[in-house]
Amino acid sequence: EVQLVESGGGLVQAGGSLRLSCAASGFTFDDYNIGWFRQAPGKEREGVSCISNSGGITYYGDSVKGRFTISSDKAKNMVYLQMNSLKPEDTAVYYCAKTAKYYGCSFYRSRYDYWGQGTQVTVSS
């Protein structure tokens, strides 16, 4: 059974940092790309970052470039999202997701077939 479990969310002041973790299981980690998305209240879910199955290619949304860093640990089947210089507008539920077979990294939600339950990130001003 495919499982993606996020952790690491919480409450932080503006300018602070958090590191989110995504624990993956139930599939061959090396074969799929992993993305991070977020959804704020009343807004659509948006792509934040994605890392290729090799770990060598990363993508970032324009709003997080230069502040967030995605990484993976293949030995542990983990993907991380280091978030620095957090802003109140980063407040959202953050989800990790696995791409469906044959799809590369993108921010098209339809290309992801399994999602985690999400972790709340709240940034206070």
Image (cartoon, helix red, strand yellow):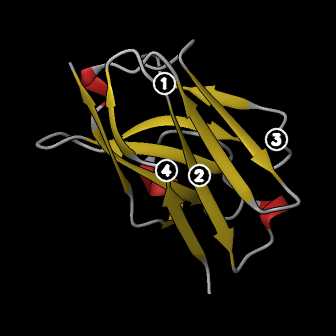
Q: Which circle's residue, 4 or 1, is located before the other in the chain? A: 4
4 or 86, which is in the foreground? 86
Relative side of 6 to 53, left or right: left
Q: Nearer the viewer, mark 2 or mark 3?
A: 2
Above or below 1: residue 123? above
Do the residues bearing badges 4 and 2 touch, measured as CB atoms within 8 Å? yes
| Residue 28, x across and y down, in percent | 80, 71
Q: Quadrant of residue 99?
A: bottom right
Mark 4 sits on what residue?
8
Where disc 2 sits, the SS reads: strand
Task: Give the mark nearest the N terminus, 2 or 3.
Answer: 2
* Residue 52 seen anywhere in this rendered image of the structure: no
Quadrant holding the C terminus: top left
- For the point 59% across and 57% down, the residue is 22
- Where residue 49 appears, as percent x and y from the top left, is 55, 35
Residue labelled with disc 3? 55
User: In the image, what residue type sits under mark 4?
Assistant: Gly
Instruction: Tell me which numbered mark, 4 or 2, is placed earlier along the sequence.
Output: 4
In this picture, is 76 found above or below 48? below
Q: Amino acid at mark 2?
A: Ser
Q: Which residue, given by chain and number where applicable, does mark 1 sit on?
A: 61
Q: Give the x, y percent position of residue 6.
A: 50, 59
- Image point (44%, 37%), residue name: 47
- From this viewpoint, which residue is outermost toward the bottom? 1
Locate residue 4, reporting x and y percent: 56, 68
Q: Amino acid at mark 3?
A: Gly
* Residue type highlighted by circle 1: Gly
Residues marked 3 and 4 touching at CB (< 8 Å): no
26 is higher (above) or lower (below) than 49: below
Q: Which residue is mark 2?
A: 21
C-alpha span from label 2 to label 1? 18 Å
